[in-house]
Image: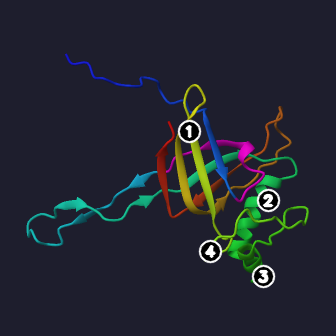
Amino acid sequence: MTITNVENRNFQSPLNYEFRVDRLKDFDFFVQKVNIPSLSLPTASNGGSNPFVKIPYPGDHLEFGELSVDFKVSEGLYNWYEIFSWMQGLGFPERLQQYVDLKSGSTKDLNGKIIPPKMLRQPHGNLYGQASLIINTSQNNPSVKINFVDIYPVNLSEISLDTRDSEVLHVTSSVSFKYDYFTVEKLL
C-alpha cells in the first residue's frame, strides 16, 4: 500500500468566501450563495478522415456556465434595484436614453440620485462590471481568487412577499450573470 504525500488534508468550507461586483455598491454584504460556474470543452471530430468512426479530439473553445448568486434583499429593495436598473439600461424597455445613461455612467438609484461609476471602461463604457470571488481557508485567510471578466446580469428572480408565513423569513432573490471568461489565481 502506498501513502500519498498530500500537503493539505483540510476540506474546503462552503462558508468562507467573499463575492464582490464592482458596480454594485449595496450587494456584497447580502450575498448568501454563489456557485463557481461550470466549465466545458466541447469535442471536435476528425471531420471524416476515418470513414468508419468519428474520433473525438479536444475542442478549441471553452464554454463557461452562468454565474448564479442568491442574496438577501435589503430593506427598501436597494440592492435588488441596483441590478434591476443595470438590466433596464441594457434592455432599454422604455426609451433608448436608458441605454445611453447606463453606458455613460449616469443611471439613477432608487432615490433618484445618479450612481457615480467606479471607473469608465472603454470601449464599452459602463455596460459591464468586473466581479471577484475570494475563497478563504478554514482560518479565514484568502486562498484563491476567481476573477470574472466583463459580467452583466441576464436574469433577476422574482421577489415573493407572503403574509401567510408564521415566522419572518427575510426576502431573497437570485441573479444570474453572463461574462466573457473567468481566471483563477492562488493567493497563498
The disc placed on residue 81 is: 2
1 or 3: tag closer to the N-terminus: 3
3D distance between C-alphas at marks 1 and 4: 29 Å
Camera-near label (2 vs 1) is: 1
> Whole-percent x and y of residue 29?
74, 43
Residue found 61% across the figure and 54% down from its top? 131
Q: Is residue 28 magenta?
A: yes
> Whole-percent x and y of residue 167?
83, 32
Q: Secondary structure at mark 3?
A: helix
Q: Secondary structure at mark 4?
A: loop
Task: Identify whether 37 is placed above or below 129.
Answer: above
Residue found 56% across the figure and 38% down from its top? 135
Front in this rendered view, residue 158 or 34:
34
Residue found 84% across the figure and 63% down from its top? 109
Q: Residue under label 4, please give it.
A: 122
Q: Residue under label 1, please give it.
A: 135
Find the magenta span and give its range. 23-37
Camera-near label (4 vs 2) is: 4
User: Where on the picture, by quarter, is residue 9?
Assistant: top left
